[in-house]
Image (spheres, rainbow, N blue to C red):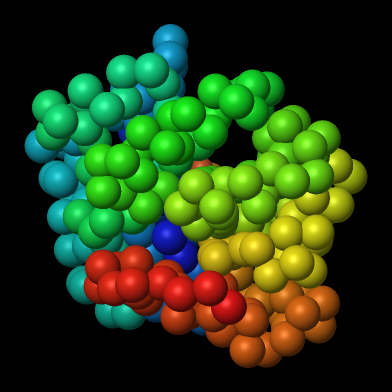
């Protein structure tokens, strides 16, 4: 499996706290069958984590990759960000402060949980007009997706892909997120399931149990698409087609 959303780089956001934490998270992911992770620290969050692309980011990715090689943990790390959609996003992109998922056409984006749907659609359309494919992180956690039945379809029509969190399909983020996640899966609107892992203890990057849930709730073919084939296409910057 390949995980496209994980806060595994220590000391940059509310994810891993230390190098040991990072390695523990990745070991746990390996035990669950994960063989590559895109490291996606929060970026451009108003009054919070900025994390624009930096030498510190590159150094930390290299440091952890080096430790994985020395401990013979067979997981490859790739660069990325979980980019908060603000009004300044397009100019930040043009200034080179934002990076996409492994420098592909795919950009992982998040919103305020109470984002207005019309505002979200405008921001997503702007990213598409820049030639990017927005991957909406955990759509099931936004109020507008829980409250507006057609929101997921609307985002797909704009040209976005949808990344459901493993915690949501297990009920870790409450009933509305659970119901919305299951609806998005049942309607085959999801394109990825990712861990959104933050720690080796809670919100972990272990994916095997979520893979089994999607196999049981949907099908093994769909689970393989969400956990393997589509994430691999992102890493390789290849086209992703509807299920
Ligand atoms: Fe995240």
**115 or 138, which is in the foreground?**
115
Q: In this view, does 227 lie to the left or right of 238?
A: right
Q: To which quarter of the image does residue 68 belong?
A: bottom left
Residue 232 image point, x, y percent? 37, 76
User: Where's the C terminus, which quadrant?
Assistant: bottom right
Number of callouts: 0
Residue 142 image point, x, y percent? 68, 35
Tell me what residue is drawn at x 26 percent, y 48 percent. 131
Res 28 seen here: no
Residue at the top extreme of this rendering: 47
Tell me what residue is drawn at x 54 percent, y 23 percent. 119
Tell me what residue is drawn at x 30 percent, y 49 percent. 132
Above-or-below relation of 144 to 208 = above
Residue 12 image point, x, y percent? 34, 33
Above-or-below relation of 160 to 71 = above
Above-or-below relation of 192 to 117 = below
Residue at the right extreme of this rendering: 175
Q: Is residue 80 left or right of residue 210?
A: left
Residue 77 image point, x, y percent? 29, 63
**167 or 189, which is in the foreground?**
189
Res 69 seen here: yes
**12 or 193, which is in the foreground?**
193
Q: To which quarter of the image does residue 143 belong?
A: top right
């Amino acid at each position: 499996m390949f995980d496209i959303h994980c806060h595994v780089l220590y000391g940059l956001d509310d994810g891993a706290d230390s190098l040991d934490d990072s390695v523990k998270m990745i070991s746990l992911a390996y035990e669950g069958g994960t063989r590559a992770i895109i490291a996606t620290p929060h970026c451009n969050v108003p009054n919070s984590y900025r994390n624009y692309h930096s030498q510190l980011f590159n150094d930390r990715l290299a440091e952890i990759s080096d430790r994985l090689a020395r401990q013979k943990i067979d997981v490859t790390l790739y660069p990325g960000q979980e980019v908060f959609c603000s009004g300044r996003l397009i100019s930040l992109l043009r200034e080179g402060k934002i990076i996409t998922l492994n420098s592909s056409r795919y950009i992982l984006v998040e919103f305020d949980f109470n984002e207005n749907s019309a505002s979200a659609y405008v921001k997503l359309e702007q990213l598409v007009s820049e030639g990017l494919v927005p991957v909406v992180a955990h759509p099931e956690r936004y109020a507008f997706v829980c409250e507006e039945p057609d929101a997921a379809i609307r985002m797909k029509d704009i040209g976005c892909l949808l990344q459901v969190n493993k915690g949501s399909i297990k009920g870790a983020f409450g009933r509305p997120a659970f119901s919305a996640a299951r609806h998005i899966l049942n309607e085959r609107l999801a394109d990825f399931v990712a861990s959104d892992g933050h720690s080796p203890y809670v919100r972990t990057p272990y994916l095997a149990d979520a893979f089994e849930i999607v196999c049981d709730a949907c099908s093994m073919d769909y689970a393989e698409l969400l956990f393997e084939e589509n994430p691999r296409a992102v890493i390789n910057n290849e086209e992703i087609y509807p299920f």
